[in-house]
Image (cartoon, helix red, strand yellow):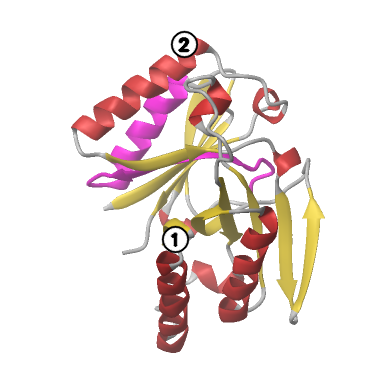
Amino acid sequence: MQFMVMHKMTEEMEQGLPPDPAEIEGVGKLIGEGVKDQVFVSGEGLKPSSQRLHIVYKDGQRRITDGPFTEAKELVAGFGLLRVRSMEEAISWCDKFAAVLGDVELYMGPVVEPWDLGMMPKPKNPPLRVLSMHQVRPGDYDDAPPDPKLVAEMGKLIAEMQESGVLQATGGLASPKRGARIRYVGGKPSIIDGPFAESKELVAGYAILNLPSKAAAIEWALRFGEVVKVNEIDVREVCA
């Protein structure tokens, strides 16, 4: 089984403050262990919401709002990691996505690169990598199988994006009913089984993990929360 573990923005992350070296070391150790055990598949950190866009598609119209977002109500249904030349190009791919899916809203912004953390020199003219996360819609709670026509059309779009070298990773998430949320109060975690409400905080980063159960994914998320000081972590199953 695959799971997506998403930690949420804190005030410090929103300010764009560099992470504590001990946190970088701790996360690196956790990921290194996950790679060795063939648990860790991929993961990215995201830049503050001041560098993100909120894009809403409704009745064939598109509305874009620039960040920062203080009251974002985010509940992720799926994601796409894109490698593009500009945000305008990324938006054009979102337009194609909405043309297939219909009314949908998403948050999109650049990911944190190694040179942003001082781990390597910044390359000349580096490509822009952005993460798009579209939001849960009412029908996403019932776990009904998707329409075969929609699946075929989305498959064609994914193939087009892969052939163009734009799409680096993508996936849909199972209903929030099958997920869990870890909330920290006073540094102590409490676990809430799904379904759960939208979150006021945007996703700050994620990891895709190969694990045998939701309980194992929650355990990994708790270990992450011991290293990085966060307020909230969502654990969601990735659709097969």
Left or right for 189, reference 203: left
Spatial CA distance of label 1 from label 2 is 35 Å
Q: Secondary structure at mark 1?
A: loop
Percent position (x, y) of residue 21? 50, 11
Position above or below: 120 against 48: above
Percent position (x, y) of residue 62? 76, 71
Nearer the camera: disc 1 or disc 2: 1
Q: Which numbered circle lies on residue 165?
A: 1
Q: Which numbered circle lies on residue 22?
A: 2
The magenta stretch spans residue 149? no
The amino acid at mark 1 is Gly
| Residue at left offset 55%, top offset 46% | 127
Q: How many marks?
A: 2
Position above or below: 180 against 45: below
The amino acid at mark 2 is Ala
| Mark positioned earlier in the residue sequence (1 or 2) | 2
| Residue at left offset 54%, top offset 18% | 187
- For label 2, the crowd category at 10 Å Cα-Cα, with few meaning under 14, some 14 to 19 and many 20 or more, is few
Q: Secondary structure at mark 2?
A: helix
- For label 1, the crowd category at 10 Å Cα-Cα, with few meaning under 14, some 14 to 19 and many 20 or more, is few
Q: Magenta residues, as a range?
A: 199-227
